[in-house]
Image: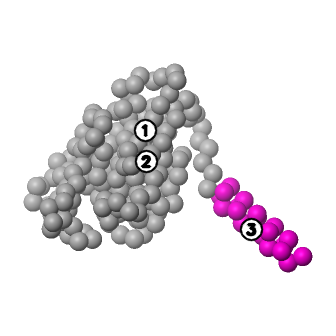
Amino acid sequence: MLRNALLILVVLLAGYFFLSRSEPRHPDGVLINSTPRQVSTSPDKRFEHAGYTLQALADFELEARVLGRETYRIDRESDLAKYDLALGWQRMSDNRVLEQIDITQSGRWYRWKTDHYPIPRREIERTSANMHMVPANDWIERQIGKLGPGDLVRIRGYLIKAEAPDGWHWKSSLTREDTGNGACELVYVESFELL
């Protein structure tokens, strides 16, 4: 009897957590019409964070739809950025486009594939990106860790270069026009908002 009650409790809890994190359903159409905003900043803007020296390369702000979130724990980069977000804006925030694109993340990469392009390939590349999130504090890190596909977010902070005393470094892309190795943004997140 007790075993059956425990089994039912486990099934109910699992169902609750599964259903409570289902993807939000948004109406069709562009949900985020703006593009990321980036403004050059002083090259002297440096600060310490988690044992690394961070240099602000540009002020950065965006509203975007979360296309995916991946967690990293064992690579060197996870000291700074435990989470990567695949983000989309403009037509890459539209259900009608996204339902025709398969999106995955692994190895600090964001990948997509489609059998039939709902929008031009170059538009997909220019209006979506994989971004490495460096949270300014524990609260922001927890909020990023709760995100899932379909969430809408506003993020403000800096595109950065990170350096370690042993010579290791990691630098953000400074354009949404690039693809491939080095095309990801490294974002120091000072402000986070769920839209």
Q: Which of 49 and 155 is in front in this view?
A: 49
Q: Which of 115 and 26 is in front in this view?
A: 115
Q: What residue type is labelled 1?
A: Arg
SS assignment at label 3: helix
SS assignment at label 2: strand
Q: What residue type is labelled 3?
A: Val
| Labelled pair 3, 1 in contact (Cβ < 8 Å) | no
Q: How many labels does the image show?
A: 3
The residue where tag 3 is placed is 10
The residue where tag 1 is placed is 111
Q: Earlier in the sequence, mark 2 or mark 1?
A: 2
Q: Earlier in the sequence, mark 2 or mark 3?
A: 3
Residue at 25 percent across and 55 percent down: it is: 158
In the picture shown, does residue 195 fall above or below 76?
Answer: above
Residue at 60 percent across and 48 percent down: it is: 23
Residue at 76 percent across and 64 percent down: it is: 12
In the picture shown, does residue 19 fall above or below 9?
Answer: above
Q: What numbered label is drawn on residue 131?
A: none
Visible residue check, residue 29: no
SS assignment at label 1: strand
**Is 6 covered by the magenta stretch?**
yes
Q: Which residue lies furthest to the right in this view?
A: 1
Q: What stretch is highlighted in magenta?
A: 1-20
| Labelled pair 2, 1 in contact (Cβ < 8 Å) | yes
Assign the N terminus to one quadrant of the image.
bottom right
How much space separates mark 3 and mark 1, taking CA atoms?
Answer: 35 Å
Left or right position of 123 against 37: right
